[in-house]
């Protein structure tokens, strides 16, 4: 099944070459990297690899994803994989994330850091607390038990298009997970490894950043319980 990987980046000059070097090329057909106006040498690092670089017109996380997906449509993908560019996930774990979709068993596979092996300190206490609260709210409102809101995930592209994603910020992952439940997609979590990221986190690196992102995540979790889409 034709597979495209989408990677949003912002000032990841040290991390993104490591990510791109370790993505198993035998498992993916195209890699689309979306840069949100990085101010360091991130773009130069990306251009060393045979990937597609999209220079985003906006800097929001979800906005970057949407622009990358719009670019990826030209490849007629059957599976889309989402992976962050900070090297905290292990790109080679994409094999476990893809296998259930390729076999036709699942529509949406989410890499769970809490089910897997997370390096000490890789998930900050504020991020861990926010993750637990978000999963609890989803279970309370939608009756489905997720263990994580992690960024490493894959979905059948035709199913993804049905979700009509519109979050342009850090509510992106929550919107996807909630809408997949509402669409009765076959959802599976698989354990993935997680390590301390390379460079400084734009979200969990500070309490204020985590709080701001957390508000957007919780807003999207609650929103789709009451808003028709």
Image (cartoon, rainbow, N blue to C red):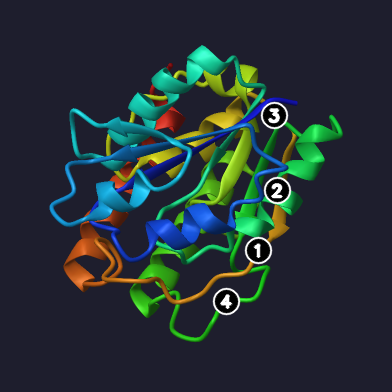
Circles 2, 4 touching at the beta carbon (< 8 Å): no
Residue 61 image position (x, y, % from top left): 30, 42
Q: For this rendering, which residue is in front, 195 or 51?
A: 51
Q: Badge 4 is on which residue? A: 118
Spatial CA span between label 2 and label 1: 9 Å
Q: Quadrant of the C terminus?
A: top left
Circles 4, 3 touching at the beta carbon (< 8 Å): no
Circles 1, 4 touching at the beta carbon (< 8 Å): no
Q: At 50% across and 15% down in the image, what residue appears?
A: 73
Q: At 69% across and 25% down in the image, what residue appears?
A: 2
Q: Residues within 10 Å of mark 1 (few under 14, many from 20)?
A: many
Circles 2, 3 touching at the beta carbon (< 8 Å): no
Q: Secondary structure at mark 4?
A: loop
Q: Earlier in the sequence, mark 2 or mark 4?
A: 2
Q: Earlier in the sequence, mark 4 or mark 3?
A: 4
Q: Badge 2 is on which residue? A: 97
Q: For this rendering, which residue is in front, 88 or 117?
A: 88
Spatial CA span between label 2 and label 4: 17 Å
Q: At 38% across and 79% down in the image, what residue appears?
A: 125
Which numbered marker is on residue 185?
A: 3
Does residue 26 show up? yes
Spatial CA span between label 2 and label 3: 16 Å
Q: Earlier in the sequence, mark 1 or mark 3?
A: 3
Spatial CA span between label 1 and label 4: 8 Å
Spatial CA span between label 1 and label 3: 21 Å
Q: Is residue 134 above or below residue 103?
A: below
Residue 113 image position (x, y, % from top left): 59, 66
């Amino acid at each position: 099944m034709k597979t495209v990987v989408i990677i949003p980046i912002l000032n990841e000059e040290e991390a993104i070459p490591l990510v791109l070097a370790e993505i198993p090329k035998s498992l993916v057909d195209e890699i689309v990297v979306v840069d949100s106006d990085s101010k360091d040498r991130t773009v130069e690092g990306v251009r060393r690899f045979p990937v597609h670089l999209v220079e985003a017109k906006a800097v929001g996380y979800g906005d970057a994803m949407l622009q990358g997906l719009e670019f990826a449509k030209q490849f007629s993908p059957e599976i889309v994989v989402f992976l962050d560019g900070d090297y905290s996930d292990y790109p080679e774990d994409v094999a476990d994330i893809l296998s259930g979709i390729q076999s036709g068993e699942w529509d949406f596979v989410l890499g769970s850091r809490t089910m897997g092996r997370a390096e000490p300190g890789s998930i900050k206490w504020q991020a861990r607390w926010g993750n637990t609260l978000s999963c609890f709210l989803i279970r309370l409102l939608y009756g489905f038990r997720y263990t994580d809101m992690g960024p490493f995930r894959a979905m059948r592209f035709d199913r993804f298009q049905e979700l009509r994603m519109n979050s342009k910020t850090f509510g992106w992952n929550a919107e996807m997970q909630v809408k997949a439940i509402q669409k009765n997609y076959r959802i599976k979590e698989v354990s993935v490894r997680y390590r301390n990221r390379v460079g400084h986190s734009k979200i969990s690196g500070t309490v204020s950043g985590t709080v701001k992102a957390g508000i957007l995540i919780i807003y999207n979790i609650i929103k789709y319980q009451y808003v028709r889409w």
